[in-house]
Image (spheres, rainbow, N blue to C red):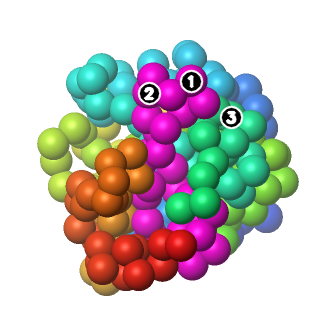
Amino acid sequence: MILLPENAPEALEAAKECLRKGGVIALATETVYGLLTRWDSSQGRERLYAMKHRPASKRLQMLAPSVEAAAKAGVRSSASLEALARRFWPGPLTLVVPDLSGTDTIGLRIPRHPFLLRLMEETGLVCAATSANLSGNPPATTLQEGLKDLALPPDLALDGGVISITQGAASTVVSLVAQPPVLLRQGTISLSEVLHALP
């Protein structure tokens, strides 16, 4: 495992290289510390599940630099998704939306964290992500908390400092599959705010 401060000059290039190879990165988001790999890496996704002892039935979140990038990776776009993206993204709102086949769903978010967003924008990669903690345990607000909890180490760990208590709340999760939309997890954005922003 390579350990670097997030603000180190070489951190961004190290993260790009790790992602391109399908490796796993532990890093800060604007909500909690997370683990991510490229969305199209089956090996990377398997390692995320193993590192967390995560049940195979629990899906990974998609982090994307834009709605367009998410659509290319398999998300079905809609007027509701576009409207909520304009209002809340980048930010701590996860939207559960249908995939292109219409037979499955994907939890999608565009993160506000500058380093993470820049990483995806400059690589053009969409990421599979989950919080950096054993499944069922509280999410980590420091890199050290996240690493000590994992069954296996990531390839690259980036220390972005302590995430504050207000930031440390996980994202609000809303399903757009149901009509009207359904709140699946409360975070910093309320369901009423989401409904108000819909076309």
Q: Which residues are magenta?
A: 81-110
Q: Is residue 88 visible?
A: no
Point out residue 176 in the picture as x, y percentages from the top left corner. 41, 53
Which numbered disc flags the more N-terminal residue, 3 or 1? 3
Task: Residue under label 2, please give it.
Answer: 104
Amino acid type, residue under disc 1 in the picture? Ser
Q: Residue sitting at 44 percent across and 27 percent down?
A: 104
Amino acid type, residue under disc 3 in the picture? Ala
Which is more toward the observer, 137 or 142? 137
User: Secondary structure under badge 1?
Assistant: loop
Q: Is residue 98 magenta?
A: yes
Task: Residue under label 1, please give it.
Answer: 101
Which is more toward the observer, 11 or 176? 176
Task: Residue under label 3, please give it.
Answer: 73
Whether tag 1 and tag 2 are in contact, CB under 8 A, the answer is yes
Query: As displayed, is residue 49 above or below residue 126?
Result: above
Query: As displayed, is residue 125 above or below residue 22?
Result: below
Label 1: few (<14), some (14–19) or many (≥20) C-alpha neighbours in 10 Å: few
